[in-house]
Amino acid sequence: MKTTLNEFKVYRAEMNDKILNSGFRDFNKFFALDNKAYIDGALSSKVKELMGLVASMVLRCNDCILYHIDRSVQEGATRQEMYESFNIALIVGGSIVIPHLRFAMEQLDNILKDKNE
């Protein structure tokens, strides 16, 4: 069963809240470190999100791919920038990335369609 972007965001928020309120402080430390990695610095947030997208595709994590596509679009990434990022993932990861490239293309189309409505 496929989930929508909104369903993904709701689930992610609920589970992150559960994790961060579990009382296990090491979770909070990692989440803070992860969040800090994507803020503007010498590299823009957009570039960092695209880098996260490439890594997620190579690591074959569809949840991560969806998250970074959404964030990249929010940060202003164009379709062409996304395609070039997808291509870097394909070159680095090889043919095993192709199923995740299919997923990424579908999700990008959905996100851009929703954004333009």
Image (cartoon, rainbow, N blue to C red):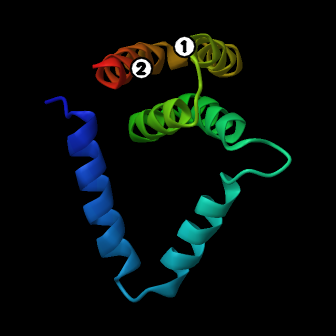
Label 2 amino acid?
A: Leu
Q: Residue at x 50, y 36 (%)?
A: 74
Residue 34 falls in image quadrant: bottom right
Q: Is residue 78 above or below residue 45?
A: above
Q: Residue at x 36, y 73 (%)?
A: 19
In this view, the residue in front, 116 or 110, is 116
104 left or right of 52 in image: left
Residues at circles 2 and 1 in contact by the CB criterion of under 8 Å: yes
- Identify the image quadrant of the N terminus: top left
CA gap, disc 2 and disc 1: 8 Å
Q: Is residue 80 above or below residue 73?
A: above
In this view, the residue in front, 111 or 17, is 111
Q: Residue at x 29, y 73 (%)?
A: 18
Residue 33, image x, y percentages: 64, 67
Residue 73, image x, y percentages: 51, 30
Number of residues whose C-alpha sits closer than 10 Å to that of mark 2, classed few (under 14), some (14–19) or many (20 or more): many
Badge 1 marks a residue whose secondary structure is helix
Q: Residue at x 51, y 77 (%)?
A: 28
Residue 14, image x, y percentages: 26, 63
Q: Mark 2 — residue? A: 108
Give me the disc on residue 79.
1
Badge 2 marks a residue whose secondary structure is helix
Q: Is residue 108 above or below residue 43?
A: above
Q: Earlier in the sequence, mark 2 or mark 1?
A: 1
Q: Is residue 23 above or below residue 40?
A: below
Extreme bottom residue here? 23
- Identify the image quadrant of the C terminus: top left
Number of residues whose C-alpha sits closer than 10 Å to that of mark 1, classed few (under 14), some (14–19) or many (20 or more): some
Give me the disc on residue 13.
none
In this view, the residue in front, 113 or 11, is 113
Label 1 amino acid?
A: Arg
2 left or right of 47 in image: left
